[in-house]
Amino acid sequence: MNGSFPSSIEPLRGFLDIIPDMCFIMSAELKIEECNQRARAVTGLPMQLDGSIPFASLLTPDSPRPPFEALDDTSRSCETEVRFRQDGRRAMDALVYVHRVTDGATHRYMVFGRDISGTKQRELDLLRFANVVHYTVNPIQITDAAGRMIYVNPAFERTTGFAKEELIGRNPSIISSKKYTTEFWERVWITISAGKIWNGEVENRRKDGAPLYTQLLISPIIDIDGKVVGYLGSHRDVTEQRALEQQLMHSQKMESIGTLAAGIAHEVGNPLASISSIVQVLQRTMSDEFARDKLGLVQSQVHRITKIIRDLVDFSRPSNYQVQPTDLVKVLTDSVEIVKMGKKAKEVTFYTHVRQQVPLLSLVPDQIAQVFINILLNAVDALQGKRGAITTTFERDDDVVRVTIEDTGAGIAPDHLPKIFEPFFTTKRVGEGTGLGLWVSYGIVKSFRGDVSVWSERGKGTSFCVSLPLNPKDYAHG
């Protein structure tokens, strides 16, 4: 309209009604002189307007106002967002374009308004979705259609140990454990590229190499044409759950072995006692030295079997020993003296360091001595008869006493470390060990609410750490 306006707006009515957006013609005083059908449908304005209704009355109280007064001959138009009232309905968000037109010495305003409520709602929904994805505790990754990561949330960074800068543009295989075949991932890809959801548990690797178990759901992102344009991968970290399940399975296994041990003690113990008695009678009544010697071998094997059964049942019934204030340093010193007497310990040098005063602990002296002797004997065996050292160290903090027994022996193979506290596990030759010593020791320490940990490296040695809690009453003895 090149800045001018006809003296009568009547000829414009037919033209305005064919425009799909809202149209308003207003006086210089911002009163509505004319509008089209779309504007009436939205605002409820009457068919006949007398120029008395202010444009501002059509807007909600919290709506921004177009800057009409700021428009002059040099700046004749502007664009802004407003909110129109709608009787009995939700307010309408609209983008309005305001144009100032002249009519001789006076001027009017033309306002065109486009409904953007749907766009605003989609933007709000997108913002909500973005916040949910960004701040959820579950690791989230989004890839493009080719499978390259274009977004990871902070939880994904925390869980995997990778920064987003290391992940964006990369394939998710960067965290793969490499334990799954190509055929496995091809089946996953076929499923999601067909627009279907894939769900399953996978094992990945953190940046530091630690295993990461997650329940993974991969959902295709599909555009309005039904085309897959990307994928959303939602992980639920179940690493700790897997560890707890393993602990539970281990506990159940130990409980089963304890039950089995009780049955063995009952079914085998009595016959062994009878055999031992018969052997003793025969030894006293026979004069044949050869036969007596062989009977002695039988008796030693009976004693060996009896000891194995006794060790087994240690976990299947409560101890009958009495808990009493125990000098841990003296118990370990005595244990070292006992181990020193063995033939294999002749080339071994023993050292003991007490770094803090250790109070008397509420323990069973004989049982804790058995723990130390078992660990010390293993340390001697690890030296394989060669010259070496075994060092014992006492440390104490506010609530725990730690006893470390370290040797300079051959070390333990990495694949053996997780098994050393299992019953009957031994790397010694047949007849040299039962595989029960460390298992029983572990059970004894656990019965005192303590713990046993082990560190080892092939060719450098092994270190066992026995941790025992301090009770308030223990301080009274200290």
Image (cartoon, rainbow, N blue to C red):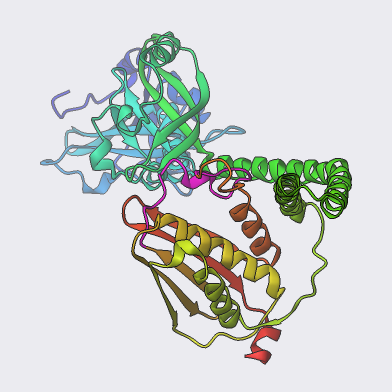
Q: Does residue 50 show up? A: no
Segment colored magenta: 408-427
Residue that protrudes farthest toward the front in the picture: 287
Q: Is residue 113 above or below residue 80?
A: above
Q: Which residue shows up at 52% across the image and 88% down it?
A: 357
Quadrant where the image shows the N terminus: top left
Q: Position of residue 164 (x, y in %)?
A: 28, 42
The part of the image, by quadrant, that contains residue 108 is: top left
Q: Is residue 426 magenta?
A: yes
Q: Is residue 349 above or below residue 231?
A: below
Q: Nearer the viewer, residue 469 or 242?
A: 469
Q: Position of residue 94 (x, y in %)?
A: 39, 32
The chief SS type of the magenta part is loop
Q: Is residue 354 above or below residue 182?
A: below
Q: In the rendered view, does 369 fall on the left or right side of 413?
A: right
Q: In the rendered view, does 427 fall on the left or right side of 450?
A: left
Q: Nearer the viewer, residue 245 or 123?
A: 245
Q: Does residue 124 show up? A: yes
Q: Is residue 266 magenta?
A: no
Q: How many numbered marks, from 0 up?
A: 0
Q: Which residue shows up at 32% across the image and 37% down it?
A: 27
Q: In the rendered view, does 4 fall on the left or right side of 250?
A: left
Q: Which residue shows up at 66% across the image and 56% down it?
A: 440
Q: Which residue shows up at 82% across the image and 56% down it?
A: 317
Q: Position of residue 234 (x, y in %)?
A: 47, 32
Q: In the rendered view, does 339 fall on the left or right side of 408?
A: right
Q: Nearer the viewer, residue 132 or 121?
A: 132
